[in-house]
Amino acid sequence: MDKAELESFLKVLPPVDFCCVYGSALHPNNHEKSTMVDYILGVSDPEQWHSQNLKMNKRHYASWLAHLGGARMITQIADEIGVGVHFNPFVSWNDKMFKYGIVRMHDLVQDILNWERFYLSGRLQKPVHILVDNLDLENVNSSNLRAAISAALLLLPPKFTEEDLYAKICSLSYMGDLRMLFAEDKNKVKKIVQGQFDLFQSRYKSFLEEYEAKELLRLTSYGSRQTNISQDCGLSVARHLVNTLPPMVRSQMGMKLGEKTKLSDSGMNFNLSLADLW
């Protein structure tokens, strides 16, 4: 689907402040009509937005929510039980299937900056196609992308490939996700990266060049699009990478380190790993 087709669906919904498309619809060779097109919609007031959308598109909602819950319950469930996002899946329109999630803009920004729930921030670390961006969220998300690279580097060995890096970034949001142990395709991360490699590359190229200029990475190109990467795993570099992570993550790492220091003092030795936080 081209940009005009993707934007056309927004015309049947109330106005939004932010919209991006993600998932399998972004695969360059994926033209299947059966493929679900996934949207994230950011709005200032979800309850007000749902109230308008129930009048316009009541059939998009589960019948019990539309008839018994209403906009207030929909918003409360998203806030208190979910991850701040309400999804309307399996929406049929113009011979295609859509799924869209609605989130409060404040919650979206906080997750991007602080990884509070690490749901939408993880989603926006992967390739997305932004259709509406009234508050320049793409610029805000640059700190999320830089933090994602740093987190991935802290989990990677001294030498790896560019594909390894994107796979590690992609896997961050799945760490601790039980779906990856049971229901999800075990090769999901690999398929995402291989299917969207050029999109990952364009998303992270400037950050790789920045890290190379700071002598945190050494990049060696090979083949038509791949790069071998090596990194210094010394303490000073690790400290620099940790400092680019969100404050909440740094705080959690500090608490974990404090706990392990106490255990180490009692004769038990442990190594702190970023993976411990997921």
Image: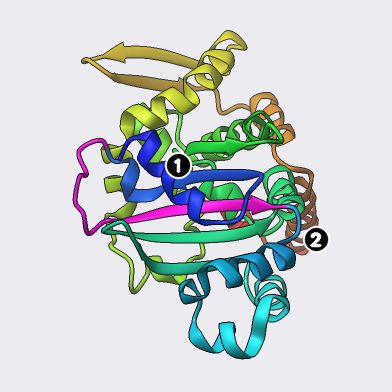
Residue underneath mark 1: 7
Q: Is residue 276 above or below residue 179?
A: above
Give the structural element (helix, strand or loop) at label 1: helix
Q: How crowded is mark 2: few (under 14 residues within 10 Å), some or many (20 or more)?
A: few
The magenta stretch spans which residues?
Answer: 28-43
Q: Is residue 258 above or below residue 52?
A: above
Residue 32 covered by magenta stretch: yes
Q: Residue 170 in the image: x percent, y percent?
A: 44, 45
Outermost residue toward the top?
213
Q: Residue 246 in the image: x percent, y percent?
A: 73, 42
Residues under numbered marks 2 and 1 in contact, where contact means CB atoms less than 8 Å apart: no
Residue at left offset 43%, top offset 50%: 9
Give the CA separation, mark 2 to mark 1: 55 Å
Q: Residues within 10 Å of mark 1 (few under 14, many from 20)?
A: some
Residue 17 covered by magenta stretch: no
* Rendering quarter of residue 194: top left
Residue at left offset 28%, top offset 40%: 27
Quadrant of the snapshot with the N terminus: top left
Q: Is residue 66 above or below residue 244?
A: below
Of pointers 2 and 1, the one earlier in the residue sequence: 1
Give the structural element (helix, strand or loop) at label 2: helix
* Rendering quarter of residue 49: bottom right
Q: Residue 59 in the image: x percent, y percent?
A: 46, 76
Residue 132 visible in the current orientation? yes
Residue underneath mark 2: 262
